[in-house]
Image (cartoon, rainbow, N blue to C red):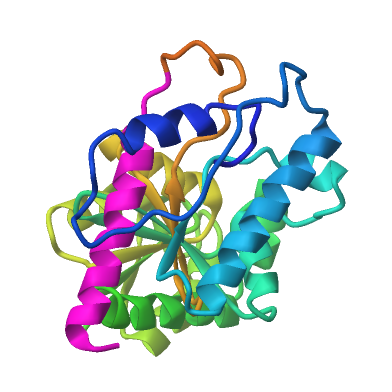
Amino acid sequence: MGDPRGIGPEVVRKALRQPLDADVRIVGGWEDGGGGKTPSDLEAGRATAQNIEAAARLALSGEADAIVTGPVNKLALHAAGYRFPGVTEFLAHIAGDIPVAMMLTTGRLRVVLVTTHLSLRDAIATVTTERVVQTGRIATDALRQWWGIAAPRLALCALNPHAGESGLFGDEDDRLLRPAATALDAAGPLPADTVFVRALRGEFDAVLAPYHDVGMTAVKVSGFGTGVNVTLGLPFIRTSPDHGTAFDIAGKGIADAGSMRASLELAVELVGARRHRGD
């Protein structure tokens, strides 16, 4: 359910009002608040982390085919001693400190982030050819194994305006991103103001975005309320809604469960596709 103080419990309940599939069994439970007492950051963070750990253990043991996590509060997780940038990195640690990547998807648009929760300054410094190639290979494997796309078509979103305009607006695109695109047999780097439109029109199966907000903005503008976060590279399927805890509306009964429902449906779809292929 994510942080018990947020909208997680509400959107989970709403999303499960309609059955998912005759063959789907939901494992999990939750409680609102805690006997009328609002948990502290430490208590909420500990409960959130323990639930995520329990779900991951079920998936790693084969008792669950996929996990769907609710929105978390990163400050609460840090207060409880779980000092990860996000759930993506936390799950990567639980699975054995393996390389993973964050994908956001809505409709036909799939965006994979090269860097996640970093300041823009740190994100730019972290974008290397090697990191882009690693992220692209994780994305390619997932598109083949989970989505059944035999020859995934990747595009690399540029870091600078106009993809650097031949060095006028920065040399990172030519110096760092172009070699990565070549190694991945991907298109680009292509300017951010056109690459997502081209992906929406079906030209690419996924876009690699160099930093968090350029990718997230594209997903949320094109499908706000229906976006799903998928962690690629894990030995099990994990999805989550593309929104936060929304403490300001928690408990009011007005939270939109569309993204949580989409997360559940995509998890079921990916599990079904894997079973069909015999993976």
Residue 225 visible from this viewpoint: no
Residue 76 lies, in percent from the top left, at 77, 38
**Furthest residue in direction top, as rendered:** 252
The secondary structure that most of the magenta stretch takes on is helix
Q: Residue at x 66, y 61 (%)?
A: 53
- Identify whether 34 is placed above or below 167: above
Location of residue 141 in the rendering, given as x and y in whole percent from the top left corner: 37, 83
Q: Residue at x 29, y 70 (%)?
A: 271
Q: Is residue 124 located in the magenta-colored stretch of the structure?
A: no
> Which quarter of the image is occupied by the C terminus?
bottom left
- Residue 199 visible: yes
In x, y percent, where is residue 79? 86, 42
Q: Quadrant of residue 241?
A: top left
Is residue 136 shown above or below 202? below
Residue 234 in the image: above or below residue 118 = below
Is 273 inside the magenta-drawn segment? yes
Q: Nearer the viewer, residue 18 or 163?
A: 18
- Residue at point 68% right, 38% down? 73
Q: Position of residue 50 (x, y in %)?
A: 71, 54
Work out whether residue 171 or residue 44 is closer to the camera in this orientation and state it. Answer: 44
Q: Nearer the viewer, residue 112 or 228?
A: 228
Q: Quadrant of residue 61?
A: bottom right
Q: Quadrant where the N terminus lies?
A: top right
- Is residue 22 found left or right of 213 in the rendered image? left
Q: Is residue 188 left or right of residue 93?
A: left
Q: How many discs mark residues in the rendered view? A: 0
Residue stretch rendered in magenta on the structure? 255-279
Asked if residue 50 lies left or right of residue 231, the reply is right
Residue, x 39% and y 79% (percent of image)? 181
